Amino acid sequence: MNEMNSDFAADAYQAAGEQSSKQKLDIFLAELGRLKRIVAGLGLSAQDGEDVLQDVSIKALKQSGKCRSREDGVRWLIKVTVNRCLMEHRRRRSFHRRACEILKRRAANKAAPKGTDEKVIDVEELEIVRESLWELDDSLLGPTILRYFCDFNSKEVGQILRLKPSTVRSRLREARMILAMRLLERGVEP
Amino acid sequence: MERSCEEIREILVDYADERSRQGWPSPLSPSESNKVDEHLDKCDHCREMLGALQRSLELAQVIWEDSLAEAEKIRIPIPHRIRKVRWPRYAAVAAGILLVITTSLLWRERVKPAGKEVSFTEIERRINESGSAARLLAAAELLAEYPDAQSIVKQQYRYIVETYPKTTAAAKAKLKIQ
């Protein structure tokens, strides 16, 4: 955790006052990295992401004594974040950055030389996937981000989103097929 | 699409995950994996689909990672700042504003030219005058509809202008005379 976050914890503890709130904030800080991945996975801008995470932190402060265990607390936090992000995602039209911009930034940010195993990324391909992600239904996008970007397994995704693991698996299958089919339909040879 | 292709596609996503993410526990049994291997050896369509599944996920990762670089910059405003009101600072600001307002009011009071204060009797008198003038004007306007009464009407207007000069009715009467 960086300095800002430890300051945040100390100040927040003082303000919250209650033990349960302290625990919630503790979980919030511990999971902040993962929450940022959710924000990023749903394509929110830094500004929108900040708003969402601020809301979530306040909710965590207010919501006291409702979780039985730390795992429950983490699940609650992630669910709240996913829901808030999905709301923002639809409202703000996320995944705003176009493929060429992504590649430009990627090229500029890559300090190390390109690995030999990495395929050259085609702008057209990237744009198709970006559009497909944008068009993906919320019910598919949420589980996809949690599974493939936040590394939760299907059971955990199910617990977070209150879905059966089999439902999660079928939604993941559907989402993956949609993304793959879009590439094939547009004549991109993988 | 053949029936066997349909069956394979049901488990192709799990197969793709198994191959691209070595660390993950495989949801497929060894026999299922073998079945997919064998099918892929002879089916171009499913091989293509497998490639597209893997490629689309790689590209989605690129998009997500790009967004993450931006999200990493997020700084969370400290919640207690929203709750904790800094009273001394706000009190100082409020006191400052109050002081400025009071000073400006006092200053205005001092520099204001001494004007005539209007008493209630005066107000009452003006209301009565306006009422009387308005009534006379209304009567004159009714008379004005008769051609024979034009000279009386003009006299009436003049009377209103002379007797109640500061009223709205007098201003209207003046216009009628002109």
Image (cartoon, coloured by chain):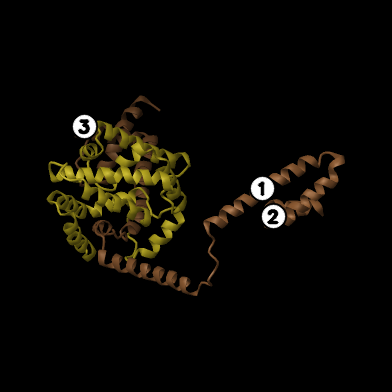
Q: CA distance from mark 3 to mark 2?
A: 112 Å
Do we see residue A118 in this rendering?
no
Residue A35 placement, left or right of A183 = left
Q: CA distance from mark 1 to mark 3?
A: 110 Å
Under mark 2, the amino acid is Tyr
User: Label 2's element?
Assistant: loop
Q: What residue does disc 1 label? A: B132
Whether marks 2 and 1 lie on the same chain: yes
Do we see residue B129 in this rendering?
yes
Residue under the image location 17 percent in, 50 percent down: A21
Q: Quadrant of residue A137?
A: top left
Q: CA distance from mark 2 to mark 1?
A: 9 Å
Task: State which chain disc 3 sits on.
Answer: B
Under mark 3, the amino acid is Ser
User: Label 3's element?
Assistant: helix
Under mark 1, the amino acid is Ser
Task: State which chain disc 1 sits on.
Answer: B
Task: State which chain disc 2 sits on.
Answer: B
Say which chain is brown.
B
Residue under the image location 37 percent in, 56 percent down: A47
Q: Is residue A128 above or below residue B101?
A: above
Residue A147 placement, left or right of B53 = left
* Hue used for the chain lettered A: yellow
Q: What residue does disc 2 label? A: B164
Residue under the image location 69 percent in, 49 percent down: B133
Q: Are marks 2 and 1 in contact (CB under 8 Å)?
A: yes
Q: What residue does disc 3 label? A: B31
Q: Upstream in the sequence, badge 1 or badge 3? A: 3
User: Label 1's element?
Assistant: helix
